[in-house]
Amino acid sequence: MKKLFLFSAIIILSGCATKNYGRQGELTQYEKDNLSCHEIALEEAKVQGYLDHVEKESQFDGRSVLSFLGDFGVGNVMEKKAAIKSANARLVQLKELARMKKCDEVVE
Protein backbone atom coordinates (compact mmCIF):
# COMPACT_ATOMS: atom_id res chain seq x y z
CA MET A 1 0.00 0.00 0.00
CA LYS A 2 2.85 2.38 0.83
CA LYS A 3 4.47 1.65 -2.52
CA LEU A 4 1.24 2.46 -4.35
CA PHE A 5 0.90 5.72 -2.40
CA LEU A 6 4.52 6.68 -3.11
CA PHE A 7 4.17 5.87 -6.80
CA SER A 8 0.93 7.90 -7.00
CA ALA A 9 2.55 10.86 -5.25
CA ILE A 10 5.50 10.81 -7.65
CA ILE A 11 3.18 10.73 -10.68
CA ILE A 12 1.08 13.60 -9.32
CA LEU A 13 4.11 15.73 -8.48
CA SER A 14 5.77 15.05 -11.81
CA GLY A 15 2.71 16.38 -13.61
CA CYS A 16 3.20 19.69 -11.79
CA ALA A 17 6.92 19.65 -12.45
CA THR A 18 6.86 20.46 -16.14
CA LYS A 19 8.28 23.95 -16.59
CA ASN A 20 6.13 26.57 -18.26
CA TYR A 21 7.73 29.50 -20.06
CA GLY A 22 4.74 31.06 -21.79
CA ARG A 23 4.79 32.18 -25.39
CA GLN A 24 5.67 35.27 -27.39
CA GLY A 25 2.77 36.42 -29.52
CA GLU A 26 2.97 37.21 -33.19
CA LEU A 27 2.91 40.86 -34.18
CA THR A 28 -0.57 42.27 -34.45
CA GLN A 29 -1.63 44.46 -37.33
CA TYR A 30 -1.78 47.39 -34.90
CA GLU A 31 1.85 46.81 -33.93
CA LYS A 32 2.89 46.53 -37.57
CA ASP A 33 1.16 49.81 -38.37
CA ASN A 34 2.22 51.83 -35.32
CA LEU A 35 5.57 50.67 -33.92
CA SER A 36 8.36 53.17 -34.46
CA CYS A 37 11.91 52.08 -35.19
CA HIS A 38 12.84 52.80 -31.58
CA GLU A 39 9.93 50.68 -30.31
CA ILE A 40 10.85 47.85 -32.69
CA ALA A 41 14.37 47.84 -31.22
CA LEU A 42 12.90 47.74 -27.70
CA GLU A 43 10.64 44.82 -28.65
CA GLU A 44 13.61 42.95 -30.11
CA ALA A 45 15.46 43.47 -26.82
CA LYS A 46 12.45 42.15 -24.88
CA VAL A 47 12.33 39.02 -27.03
CA GLN A 48 16.07 38.50 -26.52
CA GLY A 49 15.55 38.87 -22.76
CA TYR A 50 12.78 36.29 -22.94
CA LEU A 51 15.08 33.86 -24.79
CA ASP A 52 17.76 34.40 -22.13
CA HIS A 53 15.17 33.74 -19.41
CA VAL A 54 14.04 30.49 -21.07
CA GLU A 55 17.65 29.34 -21.35
CA LYS A 56 18.34 30.13 -17.70
CA GLU A 57 15.13 28.52 -16.43
CA SER A 58 15.71 25.38 -18.48
CA GLN A 59 18.82 24.55 -16.46
CA PHE A 60 18.67 21.41 -14.33
CA ASP A 61 16.82 21.80 -11.00
CA GLY A 62 14.38 19.99 -8.72
CA ARG A 63 11.54 20.26 -11.20
CA SER A 64 13.75 18.59 -13.78
CA VAL A 65 14.13 15.57 -11.49
CA LEU A 66 10.39 15.29 -10.87
CA SER A 67 9.65 15.77 -14.55
CA PHE A 68 12.11 13.05 -15.46
CA LEU A 69 10.33 10.66 -13.12
CA GLY A 70 7.00 11.38 -14.80
CA ASP A 71 7.81 11.60 -18.49
CA PHE A 72 11.59 11.24 -18.76
CA GLY A 73 11.89 15.02 -19.18
CA VAL A 74 10.09 15.05 -22.53
CA GLY A 75 7.55 17.64 -21.32
CA ASN A 76 10.27 20.12 -20.40
CA VAL A 77 12.05 19.67 -23.72
CA MET A 78 8.81 20.17 -25.66
CA GLU A 79 7.91 23.25 -23.60
CA LYS A 80 11.33 24.82 -24.15
CA LYS A 81 11.23 24.16 -27.90
CA ALA A 82 7.75 25.70 -28.21
CA ALA A 83 8.79 28.77 -26.21
CA ILE A 84 11.90 29.31 -28.31
CA LYS A 85 9.94 28.76 -31.53
CA SER A 86 7.39 31.44 -30.58
CA ALA A 87 10.13 33.91 -29.63
CA ASN A 88 12.10 33.29 -32.81
CA ALA A 89 8.95 33.78 -34.90
CA ARG A 90 8.31 37.15 -33.22
CA LEU A 91 11.95 38.15 -33.67
CA VAL A 92 11.77 37.36 -37.41
CA GLN A 93 8.61 39.45 -37.70
CA LEU A 94 10.25 42.37 -35.86
CA LYS A 95 13.33 42.23 -38.08
CA GLU A 96 11.15 42.13 -41.19
CA LEU A 97 9.13 45.10 -39.91
CA ALA A 98 12.33 47.02 -39.22
CA ARG A 99 13.51 46.27 -42.76
CA MET A 100 10.18 47.37 -44.24
CA LYS A 101 10.24 50.62 -42.28
CA LYS A 102 13.89 51.13 -43.23
CA CYS A 103 14.92 51.43 -39.59
CA ASP A 104 18.57 50.79 -40.36
CA GLU A 105 18.60 54.05 -42.31
CA VAL A 106 17.23 56.06 -39.38
CA VAL A 107 19.84 57.76 -37.23
CA GLU A 108 18.58 58.74 -33.79
Image (cartoon, grey):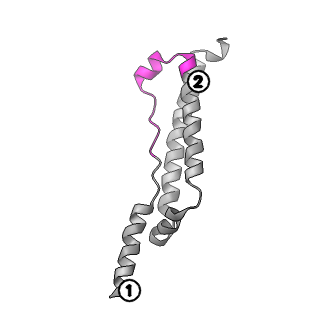
Instruction: Return the residue at label 1.
Output: 3
Residue 51 in the magenta stretch? The answer is no
Q: Residues within 10 Å of mark 1 (few under 14, many from 20)?
A: few
Whether pointer 1 and pointer 2 mark residues with C-beta atoms closer than 8 Å, the reply is: no
Tell me the residue at 37%/74% (across/down): 9
Q: Position of residue 46 (x, y in %)?
A: 55, 33
Determine the secondary structure under disc 2: helix
Of labels 1 and 2, earlier in sequence is 1
Segment tinted magenta in the rendering? 22-39
Report the mark closest to the observer, 1 or 2.
Answer: 1
Is 50 placed above or below 99 here?
Answer: below
Q: Which mark is residue 22?
A: none
User: Residue 59: where, in percent of width, then height?
Assistant: 59, 56
Residue at 42% across / 26% down in the picture?
28
Residue 96 in view in this figure: no
Q: Quadrant of the N terminus?
A: bottom left
Q: Secondary structure at mark 1?
A: helix
| Numbered label tally | 2
Q: Position of residue 60 (x, y in %)?
A: 58, 61
Q: Residue 52: image x %, image y %?
A: 60, 43
Which residue does the image show at 58% across and 21% down from the upper left?
A: 98
| Residue 32 lies in the magenta-colored region | yes
Q: Quadrant of residue 70?
A: bottom left
Q: Which residue type does callout 2 highlight?
A: Ala
**5 relative to 104 in the view: left or right:** left
The circle on residue 41 is 2
Say which amino acid is labelled 1: Lys
* Occupied quadrant, residue 15: bottom left
Residue at the far bottom in the pictured view: 1
Question: In which quadrant is the C terminus drawn?
Answer: top right
